[in-house]
Each structure stands twice: as C-alpha cells, then as structure tokens.
Amino acid sequence: SEFADYLRSATELQKNLMHRAPTDSRDIMQPMARRAANLNYQLGEYYEKREANFDTAVSYYTVANRYDDTHGECILALARIKMRQGELDICEKQLHNLLRVDQGNEEASMMMAELMMQLATQGARSTGGVQEYKDATFYYQKLLERKPDNY
C-alpha cells in the first residue's frame, strides 16, 4: 500500500540520517533511534493489523526493539503475536522485559497473568502447574490492588 511505502521510505531516510550523524553524541543519536523505532513499530503495526502478515510484522517490531528496547507498545505487540502463535516462552520473555522497565503496565500484567494461566493449564513446567497458578494469582492481585474497581 501507499502508506506502507511512505513508512518504508521514512525508515530508510532515518537510517541514512543516523549513519551520517556523529555517533558519539547521545543527545543526537537517542532521539533519532527513538524515531527509527517508532517508524518500524508503525510498519509492524500496519502489517499486523491491516495485512495480517505476522512474520513481516515481527520483523519490523524486532528492528524497532533494536533501536529502542524500552518501546512498550512494540514489546507488547511482539508478546501478543508470540502468544497467538503459541510461542509462550518468547512471549513470557517479552513481557518480563517490559515489566522490568514499566512495572505498572496494566496490559503487560494482564497478558502475563493470562500467560501464566495458560502455562498452568498445560502443567508443563511445574507439577500440575501449581507455580504458574501462583504466578497468575500474583499478577491478577497486583492489577486489583492498582485498580480495585476496574475488574
């Protein structure tokens, strides 16, 4: 689509700008890397939501994550796709990464609780999934403590 073409052009321009910028200047490189992450995130979102092309979406989200490993929306998108694809270990890793930098992230906490419930029902890790049920309870409890009237 035309929209995706414009975004791809913008990512190329941003990449070229970053190659020309002085790499020793954090004040210059950090905002440029954030912009590059946002552009790649938007491309990933386009492919995920408009084209249902999850492999291409994951590629763009991964590039965005390399530019900014604290990009919360990107990490959530990767986790969501990995959960949908049944790659639960990768999903869990993504959610842990996000919750490490943003402990109050509601969506990540909810996904983590859901993931732990899935793992518990499979019983693949701990005996009968007991530990995963405890972990899920922990995440649900944290969510309720933050917003007791929301659930």
Image (cartoon, rainbow, N blue to C red):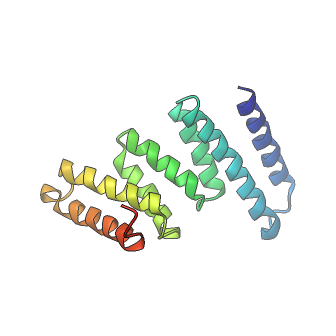
Eyeballing the image, is 84 above or below 1? below
Residue 133 rendering spot, x and y as whole percentages = 21, 61
Any part of residue 137 in sight: yes
Q: Is residue 124 left or right of residue 110?
A: left
Q: Is residue 63 left or right of residue 99?
A: right
Residue 3 rendering spot, x and y as whole percentages = 73, 32
The image quarter containing residue 5 is top right
Q: Is residue 151 left or right of residue 73?
A: left
Most extreme residue toward the front is: 149
Task: Tell me which residue sits at (32%, 53%) in the image.
Answer: 114
The image quarter containing residue 7 is top right
Most extreme residue toward the left is: 128
Q: How many marks?
A: 0
Task: Tell me which residue sits at (85%, 62%) in the image.
Answer: 22
Task: Tell me which residue sits at (78%, 47%) in the image.
Answer: 15
Any part of residue 124 in sight: no
Looking at the figure, which quarter contains the N terminus? top right
Residue 39 rendering spot, x and y as whole percentages = 71, 46
Q: Is residue 71 left or right of residue 89?
A: right
Eyeballing the image, is 11 above or below 96? above
Task: Tell me which residue sits at (84%, 51%) in the image.
Answer: 17
Residue 28 rendering spot, x and y as whole percentages = 82, 64
Looking at the figure, which quarter contains the C terminus? bottom left
Eyeballing the image, is 6 above or below 143? above
Out of 20 and 87, give the one closest to the viewer: 87
